[in-house]
C-alpha cells in the first residue's frame, strides 16, 4: 500500500480481470437499511431537469441487433474519430485534476436522478429491483437479511483504508438484462447516478466502486460523480485509481472496466511526480470520454505527442512522452 496524501491510499490488486460492475454501500454492523427505507428514499429522489442524464440511458435501453432490451453503445456526448480528427480531444480546462468538481450551482445534497422500486418480491424481502433512467438494477443485502457479498476495497479516498474493514454491504449491480453491456458508458453513468442517490442513505459510512476496488466517503462520491455527469472531468480518483511505480511511472487500476486494459504513463523528462499524476488523470478522462488510443504516436491532452505501445499478455498500454503536456 502507498499513501499519497489528501486522505488517499493506494494498493495494487492482482485480480482486476475478475471484478464486476457494481456499487457497494458500506454500513456499520447492524445499521443497514431495510426495504421500507429504500422506498422512502425513492419517493424523495430526483430533481427537475435531468434530461441530460436520460439521453444516454435511453439509447442504452433501445432495441438493438440482439433483440428487445439489447444494450447499444451510445453516449450523451459526441465521440470523435481519433484517426480523422487531426488532433486530440481535450479535458475540461477547469478540472485538470480529474476530480470532477460540480459546475457552479451543483450542491452535494441535491438529488441527481429520480428512481423507483420496480420490483419488491414478498418472498425475498432482502433485495429490490430499482428503475432509473429506463434501466433496472438489483440492490441486495437489505436488513434484516444477511449482508451482500462485496469485495474488500484496495484504494481509499477521503477516508483511511482501514476504516472500510468490518463493515456490512448493500450491493447495487446491473439487472440481468444488462449483464452483457454492464461496462457500456450509458449503463455506467446510470449506475453511478443511482449510486449518488443511494449515497444519501442515513448511516452510510462509505461507497465502493467495485470495478476499481475503491472506497470513498459518500460526500466525495457524490461530488466527483455529480461533476462528471454534469459535464466535468471523469473522476479518475474514485472510479479508477492510480498506483505509482518506483521509477516514477503511474499505472491505473480499474480503467480496464471502461477500456479493456489499464494504462501505464511514464514521467516526462524533468516532470514532478505530482504533475505526472495530474497528466495521467487528463489522459484517463480523454480515454473514457473519447475512446482508446491506437498503438503508435497519438495526439494527447494539451497537444502532447503520446507514444503508445500495448504490452503483450498484460492488458496494459504503455505511454511515453517527449515532453510534459
Image: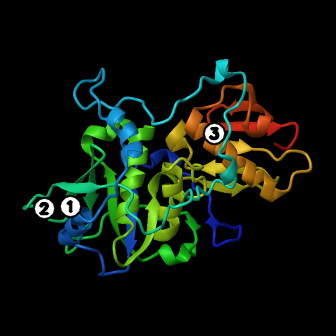
What residue sits 50% from the left and 43% below the top? 257
Q: Position of residue 91 (x, y in %)?
A: 66, 43
Cα separation between marks 2 and 3 = 43 Å
Q: Of discs 2 and 3, which sits in the foreground?
A: 3
Cα separation between marks 3 and 1 = 37 Å
What residue sits 26% from the left and 53% below the top? 138
Residue holding disc 2: 124
What residue sits 92% from the left and 50% below the top? 270
On the rendered structure, is 124 left or right of 48?
left
Q: Position of residue 10 (x, y in %)?
A: 63, 63
Quarter holding the N terminus? bottom right
Residue holding disc 1: 127
Helix, strand or loop at mark 3 = helix
Asked if the residue under mark 2 is in contact with the one under mark 1, i.e. CB atoms within 8 Å, the reply is yes
Q: Is residue 15 visible?
A: no
- The relative height of residue 264 versus residue 82 in the rendered view (above or below) is below
Amino acid at each position: 500500500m502507498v499513501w499519497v496524501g489528501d486522505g488517499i491510499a493506494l494498493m495494487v490488486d492482482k485480480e482486476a480481470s475478475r471484478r464486476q460492475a457494481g456499487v457497494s454501500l458500506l454500513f456499520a454492523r447492524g445499521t443497514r437499511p431495510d426495504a421500507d427505507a429504500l422506498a422512502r428514499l425513492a419517493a424523495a429522489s430526483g430533481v427537475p431537469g435531468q434530461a441530460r442524464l436520460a439521453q444516454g440511458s435511453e439509447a442504452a435501453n433501445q432495441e438493438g441487433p440482439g433483440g428487445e432490451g439489447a444494450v447499444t453503445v451510445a453516449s450523451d456526448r459526441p465521440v470523435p474519430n481519433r484517426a480523422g480528427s487531426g488532433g486530440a480531444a481535450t479535458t475540461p480546462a477547469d478540472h485538470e485534476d480529474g476530480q470532477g468538481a460540480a459546475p457552479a450551482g451543483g450542491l452535494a445534497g441535491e438529488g441527481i436522478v429520480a428512481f423507483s422500486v420496480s420490483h419488491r418480491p414478498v418472498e425475498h424481502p432482502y433485495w429490490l429491483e430499482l428503475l432509473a433512467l429506463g434501466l433496472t438494477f438489483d440492490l441486495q443485502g437489505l436488513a434484516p437479511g444477511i449482508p451482500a457479498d462485496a469485495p474488500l476495497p484496495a484504494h481509499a479516498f477521503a477516508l483511511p483504508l482501514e476504516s472500510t474493514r468490518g463493515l456490512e454491504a448493500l450491493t447495487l449491480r446491473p439487472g440481468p438484462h444488462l449483464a452483457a453491456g454492464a461496462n457500456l458508458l450509458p449503463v455506467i453513468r446510470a449506475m453511478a447516478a443511482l449510486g449518488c442517490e443511494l449515497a444519501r442513505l442515513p448511516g452510510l459510512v462509505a461507497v465502493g466502486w467495485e470495478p476499481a476496488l475503491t472506497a470513498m466517503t459518500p460526500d466525495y462520491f457524490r461530488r466527483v460523480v455529480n461533476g462528471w455527469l454534469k459535464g466535468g472531468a471523469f473522476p479518475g480518483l474514485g472510479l479508477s485509481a492510480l498506483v505509482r511505480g518506483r521509477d516514477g511511472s503511474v499505472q491505473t487500476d480499474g480503467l480496464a472496466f471502461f477500456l479493456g486494459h489499464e494504462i501505464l504513463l511514464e514521467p516526462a523528462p524533468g516532470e514532478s511526480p505530482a504533475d505526472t499524476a495530474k497528466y495521467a488523470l487528463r489522459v484517463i478522462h480523454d480515454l473514457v470520454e473519447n475512446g482508446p488510443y491506437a498503438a503508435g504516436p497519438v495526439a494527447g491532452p494539451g497537444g502532447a505527442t503520446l507514444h503508445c505501445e500495448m504490452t503483450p499478455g498484460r492488458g496494459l498500454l504503455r505511454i511515453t512522452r517527449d515532453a510534459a503536456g
